[in-house]
Image (tube, rainbow, N blue to C red):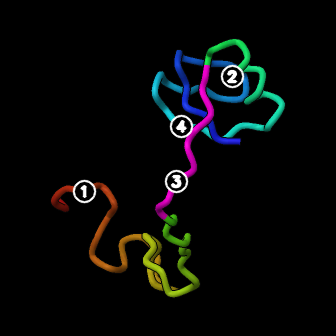
Amino acid sequence: MRVVMRTHMAGPDGSAKRGEEVDLPEKRAKELIAGRYAVAAKPSKRRRAPETAMRGGGENASRPAGKARGEDGEDGAGGARE
């Protein structure tokens, strides 16, 4: 259940700032609403953009296969070579 926090909240499960909208288990959300620590969030009319994830072919910081440190002209020290 989504709620908007009226106060700051922090604990072992995370934290939330005043005015932040958070998604909580229904039981916990109702406890916070009953204690006036949060209010129920209004349903959003905007649709969330679908999450996207890269599949393979993404950039990474690894060296090309078969290249050992120093073979590509870089010593990894970030400075000029002596």
User: Residue 42 location in percent, x, y?
Assistant: 55, 43
Residue shown at 55% from the left, 25% from the top: 5
Contact between marks 1 and 4 (CB within 8 A): the answer is no
Amino acid on which the number 3 mark rests in the picture: Ser
Residue 19's label in the rendered image is none
Give the vertical position of 5 relative to 65 (above or below): above
How far apart are labels 1 and 4 at the CA level? 44 Å
State the extent of the magenta-drawn residues as a range: 38-46
| Mark closer to the chain start, 3 or 4 | 4
**What residue sits right under mark 2 in the picture?**
33
Residue 3: x and y in percent read 61, 34
Measured Cα–Cα span from mark 3 to mark 2: 19 Å
**Of the image marks 1 and 3, the number of the one nearer the N terminus:** 3
Task: Label 1: state its secondary structure.
Answer: loop
Q: x and y percent of residue 82 in the render?
A: 17, 59
Whether 71 is among the magenta residues is no
Say few, some or many: other residues with alpha carbon within 10 Å of mark 2 (under 14 / 14 to 19 / 20 or more): some
- The residue that mark 3 highlights is 44
Answer left or right for 80 relative to 55: left
**Residue 45 image offset from top left, x and y in percent:** 49, 59
Q: Nearer the viewer, mark 4 or mark 2?
A: 2
